[in-house]
Amino acid sequence: MSRSAHPAGPRHADVLPEGHYTAPPADLNALDPRVWPQTAGRTPAGSVTVGGLDVRDLAEEFGTPLYVLDEADFRARCRAWRDAFGPDADVFYAGKAFLSRAVVRWLTEEGLNLDVCSGGELSVALASGMPPERIALHGNNKSSAEIEQAVEAGVGRIVLDSFQEIVRVAHIADRLGRRQPVQIRVTVGVEAHTHEFIATAHEDQKFGLALTGGTAKPEAGGGPAAEAVRRVLKLDSLQLVGIHSHIGSQIFDTSGFEVAAHRVVGLLADIRDEHGLELPEIDLGGGLGIAYTPEDDPSEPHEIAASLREIVGRECRGAGLAVPRLSVEPGRAVVGPSACTVYETGTVKELPGLRTYVSVDGGMSDNVRTALYDAEYSVSLVSRTSDAEPMLSRVVGKHCESGDIVVRDAFLPADLAPGDLLAVPATGAYCRSMANNYNHALRPPVVAVKDGEARVIVRRETEEDLLRLDVG
Ligand SMILES: *Cc1c(COP(=O)(O)O)cnc(C)c1O
């Protein structure tokens, strides 16, 4: 869904189909609490504040583009997830959404665990005091060095993704004299209702081991996942603690999790029948959706927790199994809504009858999701209010690429001018973490704000940083 009304005048091939548009918002100056960090508001003069700080002052001090991360909002979301799932479950924050040393400290203090999927993410986690037993290592192609780093550190679990990896992890753990707790990632054949590129649980995908089919000893019963269980149970250096599944991203309803839980619990029952063993843990992964625009309506953590507990409880009763310890792995749903990106408006180019192109001083280098996934965002004028008419706009970046779109369809006030500050909310997840140096862009800083104080937690990249890597 898009936010905009049908443009007046001639249709262009690129104009979205009819019905795609909504009317302009009643009040262009309103900050919708569904998409803005909890502490966002406007000053009497009209500029926006986050964490008690005026974005104009933040832009002045730290430059633009700038990610502003609301620490109180982030911590509140951590607590909401933690409290919703309670002491009998674990909440693993998916570090790939956004990871920094400050964030790891907040997670540690708020009682969350942490998923990492590379040596880099693991190093940040370990360097910031996350107890290794609260870290899980994921990935479909972990290197031997990454596995060794994780086993040596004593991570709480490694999520096994292939037959080859079973052997690799077992070998490394054996050599280091460890018994490594592991889960096996299975694909449950659930197609989460989301964009294809971010749905990860079709059977035809690179992650995990399928529950059915495959060529791994079908005569022994079950699919590749059941065979992986057999192989892991034979290896003394691996301790099989559970089964893992992750069905996609930006998911809004729990029916996909229902199917996943049904199939994962089915495997637990098969394991009990075949091996006389009840595994103590299941992990249903992440993928819980957030509001990118006011039209999105995600469930609250306590609703999701109640629903997942009910589903898992029911499936386990049906299979005659004790309810295992549940874990979930929200990334986006923790950090996504906690940050916004502040840009300075540059060129404003009106294409009569079509729309107005509003260029900002960043783009696909600081938010690649629109280009990559057709992601939708909203945008607001934040340096002042305006009573001007709504103007159908497309907010674009400064990169040499026509797909360099930040917000495809938005209404901005018609008096928008170069130098005005715009902010895109809900950019906490997969923006800084996917930021890149296209056109030798300098990746923006992340500034944490709280109670009127600002702190750079990831500094802005400099041209010296770029030149240091380019060794001539
Ligand atoms: C990406 C990922 C997550 C987090 O996904 P979100 O959409 O950010 O919640 C959790 N678990 C696994 C295994 C993932 O790959």
Image: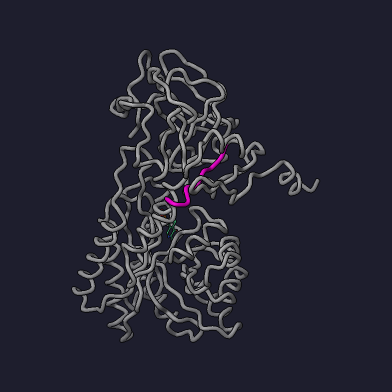
Front residue (pair 214, 181): 181
Residue beneath the point at 50% across and 24% down: 358
Residue 427 x %, y %: 47, 43
Would residue 413 be seen by someone viewing this image from the given angle?
Answer: yes
**Ligand 1: quadrant of the figure:** bottom left
Residue 54 x %, y %: 51, 36
Q: Is residue 116 above or below residue 88?
A: above
Q: Is residue 441 above or below residue 183?
A: above
In the rendered structure, does residue 171 fall within the stretch colored magenta?
A: no
Q: Tell me where residue 247 sits by quadrant.
A: bottom left
Q: Tell me where residue 320 sits by quadrant.
A: bottom left
Residue 405 x %, y %: 49, 32
Residue beneath the point at 48% across and 48% down: 451
Q: Relative to residue 361, is residue 42 drawn left or right?
A: left
The quadrant of the image that shows the N terminus is top left
In the rendered structure, does residue 72 fall within the stretch colored magenta?
A: yes
The quadrant of the image that shows the C terminus is top right
Residue 78 x %, y %: 41, 58
Give the residues drawn in magenta, as a range: 65-73
